[in-house]
Amino acid sequence: MNFATNQANSGLAAADNMPGSGHLLSADSITGDEVCNMQDEKLGKIQDIMLDVNDGTIRYAVLSSGGFLGMGDRLFAVPWKAFTLDAHNKRFLLDVDADRIKNAPGFDKDNWPNMADPSWNSTVESYYAR
């Protein structure tokens, strides 16, 4: 399921009709959602969400990019705060160009980094800092 197919189940439809309310989406509802940049280039899809259980926040979205039919994809942990919800087009926006994603610190599906490592965290956060 993704944002496009699970909008009614996620509470987004109801939240849109309430003044001053924000968007609430389940992690399952955004898995597979498209990520584009501001030039409308497709960067990849959200594969997973990483939660910081100590402070109860979403820390990263894992972006899958660069493969063909799911083969050879590289994964990128992108700080959640770097994304913008594009509810109208049912996708997320990331303000980076396609080459920047290709050169981002990434990993493969069988070799995930230790995302709790402060050094790794600092590298990723600074890479996407605006």
Image: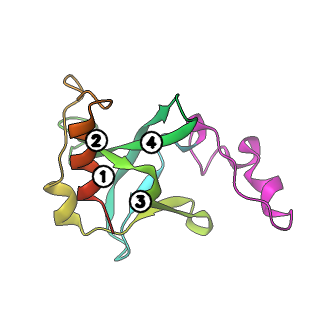
Query: What is the spatial separation of the Cα atoms under label 4 and label 1, in whole angstroms?
Result: 10 Å
| Image location of residue 107, percent across then percent down | 19, 36
Instruction: Say what amino acid the circle numbered 2 marks.
Output: Asn
Sequence-earlier tag: 2 or 3:
3
Q: Mark 2 against mark 3, which lies toward the viewer?
A: 2
To which residue does mark 1 refer? 125
As helix, strand or loop, the secondary structure at mark 1 comes to helix
As helix, strand or loop, the secondary structure at mark 2 comes to helix
Q: Nearer the viewer, residue 59 or 112?
A: 59
- Quarter of the image where the N terminus is located: top right
Instruction: Say what amino acid the circle numbered 1 marks.
Output: Glu
- In this rendering, is residue 31 above or below 38? above
Query: What is the spatial separation of the Cα atoms under label 3 and label 4, in whole angstroms?
Result: 10 Å
The magenta segment: 1-29
Task: Tell me the number on the disc at residue 59.
Answer: 4
To which residue does mark 2 refer? 121
Image side of residue 86 versus residue 21, left or right: left
- Quarter of the image where the C terminus is located: bottom left
- Tag 1 near tag 2, CB within 8 Å: yes
Instruction: Say what amino acid the circle numbered 3 marks.
Output: Ala
Instruction: Say what amino acid the circle numbered 4 marks.
Output: Arg
Give the class, few, some or many, for how many residues have Cα within 10 Å of label 1's Cα (few <14, many ≥20).
some
Query: What is the spatial separation of the Cα atoms under label 1 and label 2, in whole angstroms?
Result: 6 Å
To which residue does mark 3 refer? 82
Image side of residue 95 versus residue 13, left or right: left
In the picture as drawn, the residue positioned furthest to the bottom comes out as 39
- Tag 2 near tag 3, CB within 8 Å: no
Query: What is the spatial separation of the Cα atoms under label 3 and label 1, in whole angstroms?
Result: 9 Å
